[in-house]
Amino acid sequence: MLGGLGFFRGSTILVSGPTGTGKTTIASQFVDAACQRGERCLYFSFEEPANQIIRNMRSIGLDLQTWVEADLLRFESVRPTGYSLEMHLVILHKHIQEFDPQIVVIDPVTSFEAIGSKTDSRAFLTRLIDFLKGRGTTGFLTSLTAAGESSEQTEVDISSLVDSWLLVRAVESSGERNRLMYVLKSRGMPHSNQISEYEITEEGINLIDAYLGKSGVLTGSARLAQAALEQEKELDLRQAIDLKQLQLERKRAAIQAQITALQAELDVEHAETQLLLDQEDRRTVASQDYTASVARKRKVTDSDSQLHTSSAEDPTDG
């Protein structure tokens, strides 16, 4: 969805969506991939304790405890109401400077609304984002949105401050809920404008191309049913093509047999005609021989007649 290149280092990423859409899961998989590259990650969790996140992520095949033990990942779980916004900012700065991470996760940023107004929360997050950018640290923020809220704004109104914004949401269809994701913006890079379905499986997040049909986006079992229907249609078409090709081969063979039979008939007629011609030639030769023979015989007879006539009229013969 990001052109296969991922996010820019040092940028700020926001994932927003209602509860149950997998924002923490997406953040955890982002952290797991970073730790696999040997990058240090600092995860601030303001709703779940660290041991609970680690336990839950095991169900999708992520072993975050390994990275904690390797000192590549550190969790800081703090209740948002425990301090003021200013004190939270001081604590965040302190932990970031001590651990010196390449990636910082704030999950979720909407927790700060419990201890300040929207204006104060936005000012707090603006200072935090500026601090991360000044260090060249990648910030990964999650934001909880209310069901039915407009996708073009967040609870703390920081969409204009971030570099990349992913929106996740759940849709209900055919008696089931399925998750969708799309990129609202990602500065400095081409990105997909298509909605994609994703599943949270035992092997992490699996992104699926959503089916876009005449009736809209199909997800879950509806997508599978449509895919099966299209596969059946494709199979029927292939069978129809194979049958047509078989019929064509049979017709070609029948026509070839007819051509062979006609050629054989033509050969027979040609042979018969040749025999008649040969017979006519022999008859002509025989007729000519007969005529010549008759002619020769007549010449001999005529000569004899002339000889007898001459003898009878010769007075010297007596």
Image: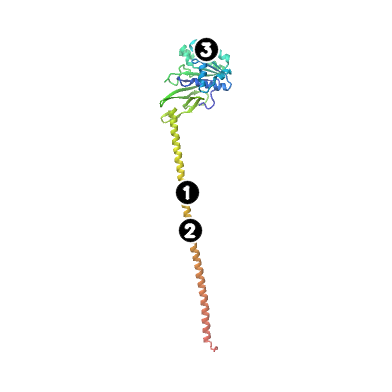
| Residue 5 coordinates in the image, percent (x, y) | 54, 26
Q: Secondary structure at mark 1?
A: helix
Q: Is residue 299 above or below residue 312?
A: above
Residues marked 2 and 1 touching at CB (< 8 Å):
no
Tell me the crowding category of disc 1: few under 14, some 14 to 19, or many 20 or more residues within 10 angstroms, Cα based: few
Nearest to N terminus: mark 2 or mark 1? 1
Q: Amino acid at mark 3?
A: Leu
Q: Amino acid at mark 2?
A: Val
Nearest to N terminus: mark 3 or mark 2? 3
Q: Residue at x 52, y 82 (%)?
A: 306
Tell me the crowding category of disc 2: few under 14, some 14 to 19, or many 20 or more residues within 10 angstroms, Cα based: few
Q: Is residue 14 above or below residue 309?
A: above
Q: Is residue 246 above or below residue 120?
A: below
Q: Residue at x 46, y 41 (%)?
A: 242
Q: Is residue 275 visible?
A: yes
Q: CA gap, disc 3 to disc 2?
A: 107 Å
Q: Is residue 140 visible?
A: no
In terms of depth relative to the viewer, which is nearer, 171 or 93?
Answer: 171
Q: Amino acid at mark 1?
A: Ala
| Residue 68 coordinates in the image, percent (x, y) | 56, 18
The label shown at residue 268 is 2
The label shown at residue 89 is 3
